[in-house]
Image (spheres, rainbow, N blue to C red):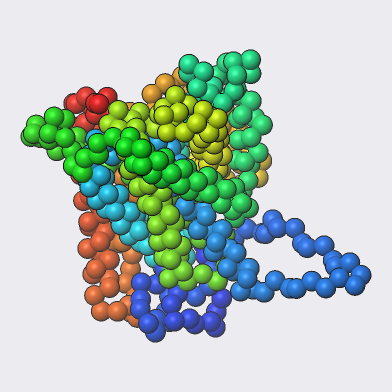
């Protein structure tokens, strides 16, 4: 039987900093870990020697560190900006603007807490990988349950992403970027998988994907600005649809007792899926150098701020432009016919292409960020050891082939989103971070009450995760899909 192996953070002796990585403490804390070493050899090629007479400015350690922090923030933001945002305009039309903003802020706050608790647990234990930290603090059963959750979430998100890519490129009724002469849906997805996705998922260090992540985040921000522009144009031309602040009394969200409570709370799993990034945090920590806990918290808060603003902009402005009948997949609402009343025909066609092409670029950046924890979790579940060597490539490409076959078989993406959020999502994003907060040992140098407040926060995460999971599953199996409402 294979023995379990874990990857631990290396700390340099003789260095003390006011704040160590993950130390919950305040000013003057010295017992927390001070430095975080990269655990894999750098893949960055050495710079070529300067030419005769050429003067080059050396890159300082401070600049390198700043670049690493920016790359980490881009990767963390991109891990959140994925397929989950497609449902937010429809969620906004069902819940109203006020409820949606409250739910976004609520889930963002819980996500910040969970990321902080994961960082604290990693620093106190010296263990990098999320799964190994959970095993260290909760035991083998906890690790097994988390690995299963990571597999379900990773595979589900990649399948949904590939389905959406098919919709973008092929679409229906001529609404795809490619002409029918390019082949059917299965052929196009196979080509995209081999030519574009396979090289991306072959990357083993997330830091090397910073450029792709920045491009993906920029594409989402550009989409947000485009929806803002459309919103302004519609408002100027008196073409804005009626926008409600709260759920309609004619819907299943109000006035139906327990069913209404279930329907409202069951929208949280969809929003939660749009914020899941805890498994990507460990890769971020592994690639950073000389990082303190406050710096990781700042990275998390910045990534969350970008995510919340983008989600709110796309959700609210799309609701105003397309009304309560906005499609559950908002891309299906961004058609040339729908945009022509606001824009000229050529500009509408350009906007149609820009939105789809931008989100396609963003989705491609999702694959390596999701594949890394997926393949690691699968290998740990089977063999309880690190995935290295030729086996890494074999597992990666077999998983990619499985995702491709599943994407050709599954049609709807919304029931999978609710199921993922209600099961694997709550475990990854809320319950296990809460358990880590409860189990992480107290430092002697922690401020008075810090350990107790961390435990209270952990209990809140676990409780909220259980409520969201139970109500989400009740909605799936007992009530009809609210996305079908007008």
* Picture residue at 27% right of the left edge, 66% below the top: 454
* Picture residue at 45% right of the left edge, 28% below the top: 340
Residue 233 in sight in this render: yes
Taking depth in this image into account, of 350 and 384 the one nearest to the observer is 350
User: Looking at the image, is 160 positioned above or below residue 170?
Assistant: below
Residue 398 in sight in this render: no
User: Looking at the image, is 265 positioned above or below residue 335?
Assistant: below
- Percent position of residue 123, x then y: 44, 67
Taking depth in this image into account, of 274 and 465 the one nearest to the observer is 274
- Percent position of residue 338, x then y: 41, 27
Taking depth in this image into account, of 344 and 140 the one nearest to the observer is 344
- Percent position of residue 105, x then y: 29, 53
Q: Quadrant of residue 148?
A: top left
* Picture residue at 41% right of the left edge, 65% below the top: 297
The quarter of the image holding the C terminus is top left
**Horizontally, is 184 left or right of 437 in the view?**
right
Q: Quadrant of residue 404?
A: top right
Give the farthest residue toward the front.
237
Taking depth in this image into account, of 456 and 69 the one nearest to the observer is 69
């Amino acid at each position: 039987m294979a023995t379990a192996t874990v990857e631990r953070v290396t700390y340099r002796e003789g260095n003390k900093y006011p704040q160590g990585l993950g130390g919950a403490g305040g000013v003057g804390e010295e017992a927390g870990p001070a430095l975080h070493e990269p655990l894999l050899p750098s893949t960055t090629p050495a710079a070529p020697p300067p030419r005769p007479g050429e003067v080059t400015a050396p890159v300082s350690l401070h600049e390198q560190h700043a670049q690493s922090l920016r790359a980490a923030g881009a990767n963390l933001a991109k891990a959140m900006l994925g397929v989950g945002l497609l449902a937010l305009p429809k969620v906004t039309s069902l819940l109203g603007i006020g409820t949606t903003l409250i739910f976004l802020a609520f889930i963002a706050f819980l996500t910040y807490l969970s990321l902080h608790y994961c960082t604290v647990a990693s620093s106190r234990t010296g263990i990098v990988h999320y799964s190994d930290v959970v095993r260290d603090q909760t035991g083998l059963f906890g690790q097994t349950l988390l690995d299963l959750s990571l597999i379900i979430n990773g595979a589900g998100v990649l399948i949904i992403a590939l389905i959406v890519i098919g919709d973008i490129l092929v679409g229906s009724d001529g609404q795809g970027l490619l002409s029918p002469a390019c082949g059917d849906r299965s052929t196009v997805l196979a080509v995209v998988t081999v030519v574009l996705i396979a090289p991306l998922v072959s990357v083993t260090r997330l830091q090397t994907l910073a450029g792709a992540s920045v491009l993906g985040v920029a594409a989402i921000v550009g989409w947000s600005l485009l929806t803002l522009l459309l919103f302004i144009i519609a408002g100027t031309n008196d073409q804005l649809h009626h926008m409600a602040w709260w759920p309609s009394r004619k819907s299943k969200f109000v006035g139906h007792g327990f069913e209404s409570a279930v329907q409202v709370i069951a929208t949280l799993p969809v929003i939660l899926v749009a914020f899941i990034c805890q498994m990507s945090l460990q890769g971020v920590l592994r690639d950073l150098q000389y990082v303190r806990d406050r710096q990781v918290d700042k990275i998390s808060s910045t990534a969350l701020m970008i995510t919340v603003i983008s989600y709110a902009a796309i959700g609210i402005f799309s609701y105003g432009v397309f009304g309560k009948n906005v499609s559950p997949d908002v891309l299906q609402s961004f058609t040339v016919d729908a945009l022509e009343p606001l824009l000229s025909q050529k500009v509408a066609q350009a906007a149609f292409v820009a939105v789809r092409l931008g989100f396609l670029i963003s989705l491609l950046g999702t694959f390596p960020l999701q594949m890394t924890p997926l393949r690691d979790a699968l290998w740990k579940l089977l063999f309880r050891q690190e995935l290295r060597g030729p086996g890494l490539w074999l597992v990666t490409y077999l998983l990619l082939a499985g995702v491709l076959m599943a994407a050709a078989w599954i049609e709807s993406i919304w029931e999978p989103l609710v199921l993922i959020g209600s099961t694997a999502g709550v475990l990854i994003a809320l319950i296990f971070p809460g358990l880590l907060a409860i189990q992480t040992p107290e430092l002697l140098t922690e401020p008075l009450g810090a350990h107790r407040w961390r435990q209270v926060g952990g209990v809140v995460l676990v409780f909220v995760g259980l409520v969201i999971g139970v109500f989400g599953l009740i909605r799936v199996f007992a009530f009809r899909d609210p996305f079908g409402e007008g």
